[in-house]
Image (cartoon, rainbow, N blue to C red):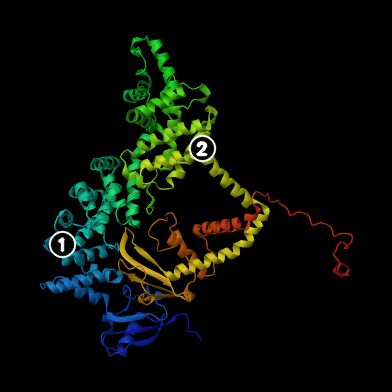
Amino acid sequence: MPPPKDVVKIAIQMVGAIPQLIELQQTKPLASVLKDVCDAWSLPNAERYALQYADGRQTYITESNRGEIKNGSILRLTTSPDQEAERLYSGIQSNNSDVKTDSLKKLASLSQDVTFAQEFINRNGLKQIFYIVEEGNDTGEMLAHTLKAFMELMEHDFVSWEILSAAFIKKIVSYVNMNVVDASVQQLSLSILENMVPTSHLLFDLVKKEVTLDRLLTHLQATNAELQLKAMALLIALLLAATDAERRDMMEYLREKNIRQFIHKNIIHSSEPPGDEMAHYLYVLQSISLNLCECRMRTPMDPYSQEQRELLQSLRQTAFESESETPASNFSTERRRSLCAKEFRKLGFMNNSNPAEDLRRAPPGLLALDNMVYFSRHTPNAYSRFVLENSSREDKHECPFARSSIQLTLILCEILHVGEPCSETAQAFYPMFFGQDHFFEELFCICIQLVNKTWKEMRATQEDFDKVLQVVREQITRTLSLKPTSLELFKTRVNALNYSEILKLRQTERLHQEETLAVPVLELRERLKPELLELIRQQRLLHLCEGTLFRKISSRRRQDKLWYCRLSPNHKVLHYGDVEEGVHSPPIESLPEKIPVADMKMLLVGKECPHMKEKSSGKQNKVSLWMDGLNVLLGKEMTSERTQRDLDVLLSMELKLRLLDLENISIPDTPPPVPKPPSNLNFCYDFCHAEQ
């Protein structure tokens, strides 16, 4: 007969004693349980003891978390959190350096536990840590343990970051700015500053002033990947906390220091590809840089602005005045106005008498004008060729440069998400972005020439303008999805994807869609689905059995801590536990924590999950696989987007194989009628007569 639900069978250990096997009644007060355990070992003063998990993070058992204890859990009788906090509080004040170092090391470990952290902070323990940092001269192991303990204590959000004294902050800054200091100390110092920056603009100003961008760039050039990562994290935190004006100044300074080229060479193309965290920071840096275009994108042209009018006139002058023998200034005002209107029409402006009106639409606003001017100044030959080539065509076949540029700028803004806020977890950056200064403008220069090329391939007229730009959008998005590593490679690939190739791709996709939408094929799909879904279920369970390495997520940052989880071969127990960096596939025996599948009731994801600290981003593969696998264990449907994609791929492959013999044969929507039986069966061959 199974034990009641409010009773769990556990083992309790103590150093130098025989373990106790007890049935823990969850309705019984924890103080009474501790009294019984201590009495069994003849220990007085039960209030001085506490229970703690023997493996993993060794969390203290409290009334609030005791419900998480599972059958078969191994606990340990240890000193209570308040007693341990008191002991370590005294230990870190010891004059004996060995005792002090050991106490700080233990403090850094125990501070992960919320119960212990509360007890230590209540004893004004943070003040003692501040004192060690502010007054100490150590830059080695002792300091590393002190900073680690500080980070863990602050992670629980019991106190505000704004309580930090100027002396403490300056000391942390000094560790970042030192040339000779333990690498772990610099990493922890960078993490502390990263957490300080978003909490108040006062702290942001202080860190920005004390830790220069030059110093962060020096750390980014370090060979230590972790130090490089922490420096990038602080840089991103500073950029996100800055005002628009401050951010623009900072990005301009970084551009002058060639940060993009450094990232392209030493991070993106290093021996090890960027990890998830670095990929996210690169995405944010790319997004911040592209969003610098937002102001110009949302600003319509001011026809009364002398500067903007001069930029507009420079487009006309670059294209036409060099070929004119008589300067326009020699003509009368009316003649000059008429000539300018004609030339603006040749440039492709819709309102040639007042071309500023074409740029009143925002977005793309002044960004379109900037792109046209950049194209005319940096690739003058290509610009002149584009304009003059089209001005000599028949009117109905000319590709309007200005109109195309305005629409193309809008398309690029939409594709590159200019003006949209950064995702908190996205990792999708374009490697070629970091290989080129003036990325947006250079991309425009390639794509506006693509517009002219595609226009000619389509033999388009003015009525086909929207159709041509749709094809161009498709050419750009398909090429970007290949993640080219440089603009040159992008240019080669996007030009190879000509209009004929787009038509072939569209035809293939349309034929595939038509084939898969035929009624008999749809019926076949439904018959194949159960078998293929079972195949996906088995793959998901196999993935869970192989296990996955996860990063622990805190309320502020992605921590360095890792944990591994895997399903037992019999699919009955989930094993998990903390692991060190570099461990990829630990044996199941080394994972101390267990969750019986039978105890799992429901899977909560996204906002429904109380443990989620970050907003949901695009579904990551490993998360989707685990969501599906856990739903399979619960006997529920797999609901992830990954499942639908996998099912579509498998169905497509299976259908193609089964329909291979029917290629170029149209499949009717209804089966052909079965013919009537023959009036007689005399056509059957009579073997007996044949033998006679």
> Which mark is drawn over residue 133?
1
In space, the residues marked 2 and 1 are separated at their CA atoms by: 66 Å
Question: Which quadrant of the view contains residue 149?
Answer: bottom left
Q: Amino acid at mark 2?
A: Tyr
The image position of residue 667, as x and y in percent, is 68, 51
Secondary structure found at label 1: helix
Can residue 640 be spotted in the picture?
yes
Q: To which residue does mark 2 refer?
A: 499
* Image position of 70 with respect to 529: above or below: below
Classify mark 2: residues with Cα within 10 Å, few (<14), some (14-19) or many (20+).
Answer: many
Q: Earlier in the sequence, mark 2 or mark 1?
A: 1
Secondary structure found at label 2: helix
* Image position of 123 with respect to 276: above or below: below
Can residue 199 be spotted in the picture?
no
Please tell me which residue is depicted at 22% across the width and 70% down the height of the picture.
107
Q: Amino acid at mark 1?
A: Val
